[in-house]
Amino acid sequence: MTTESVHLPAMLTRRAEAETCADPSSVMTLLGESDAAPGGFTSYRSSFAAGAPGAPAHFHTKATELFFVLGGSLRVLVDDLVTVLHEGDFLAVPPRTPHAFAAAPDSEADVLFVFTPGLGRFDYLRLLGRVMRGEADPKEIAESAERFDNHYVDSPVWRAALDASA
């Protein structure tokens, strides 16, 4: 059996040169992305205002999503469990696992996200920004589910958690 190795070039993104996407409650700093397989990834940093919404319940069929909390607290749903991650906490969500996230009530959150494989997810983040600013139709998000491996689901547990803190 032979194995073929793929050489991925090094990637450096300086903070001053990183693209940002913003909406009223968060700023996403796009750090790096490679669609090369195997080993492709997407990495970005999100800074959320206190109690800001993040992502509704969804799952990915191909990607593992990694969360590392750089500061503050992030409320997350994994399957049917809601918990709070604090500074220094790490979470890996495997494919096909429903999850959601938002800044914890009364707390900001600064989070590093990594997806592997990446699947050109920066374009998805740009689309979200355009929808939030009213520059794109929200239907475009649903229409892009397969392209960006982002599939929304209903979660009564997540809705109840959000309602309890409203």
Image (cartoon, helix red, strand yellow):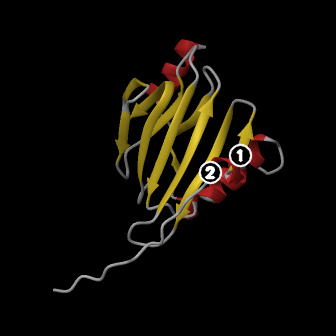
Estimate the spatial distance between the alpha carbons at disc 2 and disc 1, rounded to whole Å. 8 Å
Residue 2 sits above or below residue 60 on the image: below
Farthest-out residue, right: 135
Q: Residue 140, position in %: x, y?
A: 71, 55
Indicate left or right for 119 with 18 as reference: left
Which residue occupies the foreground of this view, 19 or 66? Answer: 19
Q: Which quadrant does the C terminus fall into?
A: top right
Q: Secondary structure at mark 1?
A: strand
Q: Residue 9, position in %: x, y?
A: 48, 72
**Considering only order in the chain, which callout, 1 or 2, is on the residue closer to the N terminus?**
1
- Which quadrant of the view contains residue 51? top right
Does residue 58 appear in the picture of this structure?
no
Which residue occupies the foreground of this view, 19 or 144? Answer: 19
Q: Which residue is mark 1?
A: 21
**At 73% across and 46% down in the image, what residue appears?**
129
**At 51% across and 69% down in the image, what residue appears?**
35
Does residue 131 appear in the picture of this structure?
yes
Residue 13 sits above or below residue 8 on the image: above
Q: Are marks 2 and 1 in contact (CB under 8 Å)?
A: yes
The amino acid beneath tag 2 is Leu
Q: Which quadrant does the N terminus fall into?
A: bottom left
Q: Which residue is mark 2?
A: 30
Which residue occupies the foreground of this view, 159 or 19? Answer: 19
In the rendered structure, find residue 8 and report the number of the disc placed on it: none
Residue 111 sits above or below residue 6 on the image: above
Q: Residue 74, position in %: x, y?
A: 49, 27
- The crowding category of the residue bearing disc 1, from other C-alpha atoms within 10 Å (few below 14, some 14 to 19, many at least 20), is some
Residue 113 sits above or below residue 121 on the image: above
- The crowding category of the residue bearing disc 2, from other C-alpha atoms within 10 Å (few below 14, some 14 to 19, many at least 20), is many
Q: Residue 130, position in %: x, y?
A: 77, 48
Indicate left or right for 134 with 142 as reference: right
